[in-house]
Amino acid sequence: MTGKAVAIAHGAATIVNAIALGKGAAFGVDLWTRAEVKLTDEPDVLRAEIVSDPKESTLLIEKTVARVLKRFGLEKSFGAKIKTLSNIPIARGLKSSSVAANATALATTAALSKTLDDLEIVKLGVDAAFDAKVTVTGAFDDACASYFGGIVITDNSKREIIKQFPLPKDLTVLFHVPPQKVYTADSNVNRLKTLKPLVEVAFEKALEGKVWEALTLNGLIYSSASSFNTKIAVDALAAGAVAAGLCGKGPAVSAVVPNDKVNEVKAALQKYEGEILRAQLNCEKAKVL
């Protein structure tokens, strides 16, 4: 069997984290993950490699390929070799799992010479994230923002898109990425769910289109509950960011910055240990290369 395909999906960042509410919002950034899937004639044998972070678990990408094969009833016909390459740091709240699942599901579908509706591809990746136990909510909001780009507001429990907005052109995103890794599966969900009334306020702001206010408010709420340093986001705001807050379950902080304030905000973030990643807003859909 010679079926092979490569696909790319772009990154995303949190506006409202869905853990407390079951509803969330996220927006696309131009960080990326590429997945290469090569079908083999060894059913049930899935060999995966994360080229950019070889020590990380490959379970999610294996489960994603398994879900797609099962969707077409071909799990007894093929195995696969999978390689992913990414510029998104893993386990920092930067949606690495959602992006990898999107790229892998898309590449597997293409390698099989099949087509699926975009949302079905996203949902297969979400199912795989549950299978691999790398998610609490399924991260449907993150997966949609990664796959479609732009701003996406979702009901994660129903797996429905509530609203989509385009992104403005004149903003840059700076991520402060601490060295330590934090895995979503280790989140104290019950503690975070006590924040529901506060997160609802942030979610309503997002629905009204006040997405940057929502991002900042959400970040302060979740940072406080998870004992992350809120000063990083506040310093970014003081330096000129239009929004700043915890990305996902952290520990990364995202700052949305007018292009003429990038240097000032970057200097504010550099006072804290960690690397600074720079990204542009993304409106481009995931695609087969």
Image (tube, rainbow, N blue to C red):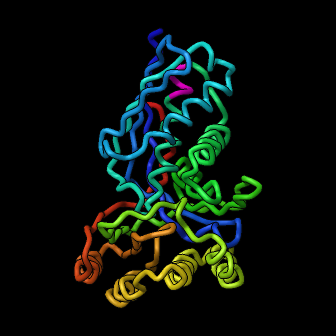
Q: Which stretch appears magenta?
A: 108-112
Q: Tell me if residue 96 comes above or below residue 74 in the rendering.
A: below
Say left or right for 46 vs 279. right
Residue lying at the far right of the rendered structure:
158
- Image-based side of 166 in relation to 266, left or right: right
Total numbered badges shown on the rendered structure? 0
286 or 40, which lies in front? 40
User: Residue drawn at (46%, 78%), measured in percent from left and top?
Assistant: 245
* Vertical relation: 39 (above or below) 239: above
Q: Position of residue 275 (x, y in %)?
A: 25, 67
Q: Residue at x 34, y 61 (%)?
A: 279
Dividing the picture into quadrants, the one containing residue 181 is bottom left
Residue at the spot 43% in from the left edge and 21% down from the top edge: 38
Horizontally, residue 123 falls left or right of residue 285, namely right
Instruction: Check the image and name the residue furthest to the bottom.
Output: 238
Q: Nearer the viewer, residue 253 or 30?
A: 253
Q: Residue at x 61, y 29 (%)?
A: 68
Residue 83: give x, y in percent of width and height. Answer: 38, 32
Q: Position of residue 243 (x, y in %)?
A: 45, 79
Prevailing SS of the magenta stretch: helix
x and y, in percent, of residue 66 in the image: 58, 29
Q: Is residue 44 left or right of residue 72?
A: left
